[in-house]
Amino acid sequence: MREDIQVILVNGGTGFTARDTTPEALTPLFDRSVDGYGELFRQLSYQTIGTSTIQSRAVAGVANGTLIFAMPGSPKACATAWDGILLAQLDARTRPCNFVAMVLPEQPRCATRSTDETPDHGQGAYS
């Protein structure tokens, strides 16, 4: 992996058809999986597509210090992933935790209290 690439967003290939092989292609590369990403993605998707979300195999992980997030290819699914998860987790101001420190080590990763500059991103903050 190139050192100047900090995050990779992949869309498509996360369903159950024969051509959906993104999880199989990515997971062997992961040094660590981010299991909560797929779990939260399916929880958020359930609100709009119901039980069809069970067929989503959205995955995420860290490979050689680079964050990789894979999501379904539909525009609505991409918006769900971005608005509901990625926007906050790729923002250093998100508290109590974010992924920015994974790619920019000088940034604190977790905090115990929120600050006035902490964005909510619709998820609330610990105080």
Image (tube, rainbow, N blue to C red):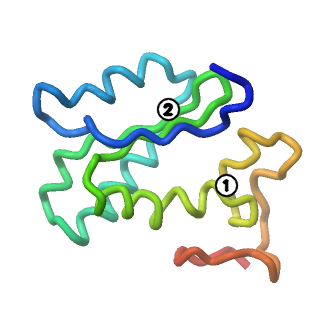
Q: Which residue is drawn at 83% across and 52% down?
A: 108
Q: Is residue 49 above or below residue 12?
A: below
Q: In this view, does 32 lie above or below 51?
A: above
Q: Is residue 98 above or below residue 124?
A: above
Quarter residue 24 falls in: top left
Q: Residue at x 79, y 61 (%)?
A: 111
Residue at the top extreme, as displayed: 28
Expressed as whole percent of the image width and height from the top left, the position of residue 80 reads 37, 63
| Three-letter residue code for mark 1 | Asn
Expressed as whole percent of the image width and height from the top left, the position of residue 98 reads 67, 55
Crowding at label 2, few (<14), some or many (≥20) Cα neighbours within 10 Å?
A: some
Q: Name the residue under label 2.
A: 33
Q: Which residue is drawn at 67% across and 37% down?
A: 6
CA distance separating discs 2 and 1: 15 Å
Q: Is residue 92 left or right of residue 78?
A: right
Expressed as whole percent of the image width and height from the top left, the position of residue 85 reads 49, 59
Quadrant of the snapshot with the C terminus = bottom right
First reached walking from the N terminus: tag 2 or tag 1: 2
